[in-house]
């Protein structure tokens, strides 16, 4: 075991390098190539989706969902404050107004009770994040949306690929859902993402938006005899070089998930006996959800303790980190919203959450050092 113990360490899991070579030698290195088709088919089947389009990032896929819904000035989108910037940015970029919703304290997902308070007829979309790959309260959120039928659900599922809620895949509930294959996620290709299209009538237009606003796909399928500019769009498609890397990863999905699960369970088993005594809280996965093992976090007593633990661990070269700076408190968040946010749970979690190093091949010896250093850090912070 070598120090520093890094927070994240991308790994080669199977035939990624062979496939990258094959993609380059095969000559189709732009988007919609042979490896991209395999990845899209696998993801389509898993989600039971109408289609899955590979994009250069999850941010792009979120932008596409905003474009698909024709969101713009006058429209409101509800997003969690406790999330990565992209969840909000993609909608602000389309000119929509944001409203920041608080999370519920158990799973750190969007709180349906707080969501209801933010709804009115201007709300056109609600974005939920399945934090840490644990499903947010989809039944509760859907119940709110049934009362506001003009608002569409979008799942930012950057953490939760292959997770489930009551047996059903995360990412299959919203009109759209989005995935990330950024190097910090469970399945990676450097930078990459996907738009999961759950409604058949959205498929054709989604391909036009992906392909610079042209009907090139219909042309390639022989549906039109020349292709031309039809709509808004951009160059959102993922290179087949990156899709080949991603295919190498997804082929090993069971192995990757099993290894991440092992890391999670090792941390959980070692920390659980100390939680009550030392006053920290571990992740909760409700019995009706299968998580995707994206991360392991701990909630500490207050910000002072959390920051002291982070410093202690960092001095011993164990890279832990925090998550997220609440978006409603950010400079841009304030600029794009139409009302002051009330997100006390987000603020408390943001102050007290600490993420431990987490990657596929984090072995038992390394985990032991992380656990020991963390417990020592908490005890040291108690003595101050
Ligand atoms: C990583 C992440 C994103 C952005 O993903 P990119 O592929 O880097 O654009 C969006 N939302 C959440 C919740 C994320 O964790």
Image (spheres, helix red, strand yellow):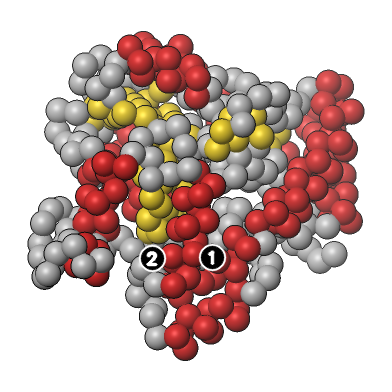
Q: Would you place residue 129 above or below residue 187 in this image? A: above
The residue carrying mark 2 is 238
Residue 8 x/y as whole percent? 65, 57
Residue 281 x/y as whole percent? 73, 26
**Residue at horizontal 11%, vertical 57%?**
230
Q: Could you tell me which quadrant the C terminus lies in?
A: top right
Secondary structure found at label 2: loop
Q: Is residue 299 visible?
A: no
Earlier in the chain: of badge 1 and badge 2, it is 2
State if disc 2 and disc 1 touch (CB < 8 Å).
yes
The residue carrying mark 1 is 246
Q: Residues within 10 Å of mark 1 (few under 14, many from 20)?
A: many
Residue 349 x/y as whole percent? 58, 27
**Residue at horizontal 81%, vertical 66%?**
2
Q: Residue furthest bottom?
A: 25
Secondary structure found at label 1: helix
In this view, the residue in front, 8 or 260, is 260
Residue 170 x/y as whole percent? 53, 37
Q: Residues within 10 Å of mark 2 (few under 14, many from 20)?
A: many
Q: Is residue 219 visible?
A: yes
């Amino acid at each position: 075991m070598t120090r520093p113990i890094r927070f994240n360490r991308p790994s080669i899991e199977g035939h990624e390098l062979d496939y990258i070579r094959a993609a380059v030698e095969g000559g189709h290195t732009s988007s919609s190539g042979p490896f991209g088709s395999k990845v899209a088919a696998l993801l389509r089947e898993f989600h039971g989706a109408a289609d899955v389009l590979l994009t250069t990032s999850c941010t792009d896929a979120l932008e596409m969902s905003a474009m698909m819904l024709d969101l713009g000035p006058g429209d409101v989108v509800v997003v969690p404050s406790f999330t990565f910037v992209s969840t909000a940015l993609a909608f602000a970029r389309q000119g929509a107004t944001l409203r920041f919703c608080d999370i519920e304290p158990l799973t750190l997902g969007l709180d349906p009770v707080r969501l209801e308070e933010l709804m009115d007829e201007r709300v056109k979309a609600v974005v939920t994040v399945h934090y840490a790959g644990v499903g947010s309260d989809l039944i509760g959120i859907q119940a709110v949306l049934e009362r506001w039928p003009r608002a569409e659900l979008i799942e930012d599922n950057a953490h939760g690929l292959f997770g489930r809620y009551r047996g059903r895949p995360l990412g299959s509930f919203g009109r759209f859902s989005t995935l990330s294959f950024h190097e910090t996620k469970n399945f990676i290709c450097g930078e990459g993402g996907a738009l999961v299209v759950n409604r058949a009538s959205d498929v054709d237009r989604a391909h036009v938006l992906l392909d610079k606003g042209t009907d090139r796909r219909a042309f390639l399928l022989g549906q039109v005899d020349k292709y031309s500019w039809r709509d808004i769009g951009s160059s959102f498609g993922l290179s087949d070089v990156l899709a080949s890397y991603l295919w190498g990863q997804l082929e090993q999905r069971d192995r990757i998930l099993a290894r991440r699960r092992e890391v999670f369970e090792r941390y959980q088993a070692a920390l659980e006996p100390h939680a009550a005594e030392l006053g920290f809280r571990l992740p909760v996965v409700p019995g009706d959800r299968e998580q995707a093992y994206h991360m392991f976090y701990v909630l500490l007593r207050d910000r002072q303790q959390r920051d002291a633990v982070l410093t202690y661990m960092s001095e011993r070269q164990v890279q832990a980190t925090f998550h997220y700076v609440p978006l409603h408190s950010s400079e841009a968040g304030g600029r794009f919203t139409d009302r002051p946010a009330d997100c006390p749970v987000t603020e408390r979690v943001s102050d007290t959450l600490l993420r431990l190093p987490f990657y596929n091949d984090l072995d038992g010896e390394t985990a032991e050092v992380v656990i020991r250093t963390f417990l020592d850090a908490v005890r040291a912070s108690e003595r101050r």
